Image (spheres, rainbow, N blue to C red):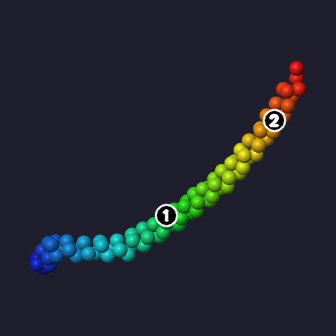
Amino acid sequence: MEAFITTVSGPLGALALSVAILWWLANRIVPVMQSYLEKQNDRLGDLVGAIEKTVTAHEADRKTFEKALGNLSSRLGKVEEDLTIIKDKLP
């Protein structure tokens, strides 16, 4: 009996306890961590998709803005011509 207690409380017992703890972690904690990390990966994918949509929308807005500025520039040119004509007609 004394040899059994010495074996269990000695290095062999510590090794057996360590193996048991590692086995428990592998069966209980690893699946939980795996599902958590997969969910985080899905959320990250959603965020990347949202950023890509934002960039695409920004590019479309920029093109519209540039077009509007071009139209504004041509309209201002017409106003300047009209003002020049009016100024020439005034005494």
Question: Which label's residue is closer to the chain start, 1 or 2?
Answer: 1
Label 2 near label 1: C-beta < 8 Å?
A: no
Q: Residues within 10 Å of mark 2 (few under 14, many from 20)?
A: few
Q: Nearer the viewer, residue 31 or 91?
A: 91
Horizontal side of residue 91 vs 43, given as left or right: right
Picture coordinates of residue 78, whole percent (x, y):
81, 39
Q: Residues within 10 Å of mark 1 (few under 14, many from 20)?
A: few
**Disc 1 target residue:** 40
Picture coordinates of residue 40, whole percent (x, y):
49, 64
**Above or below: residue 31 compared with residue 88:** below
Q: What amino acid does circle 1 point to?
A: Gln
Q: Nearer the viewer, residue 25 or 55?
A: 55
Q: Nearer the viewer, residue 26 or 89?
A: 89
Say whether residue 5 is visible.
no
**Disc 2 target residue:** 81
Horizontal side of residue 30 vs 49, given as left or right: left
Picture coordinates of residue 74, whole percent (x, y):
77, 43
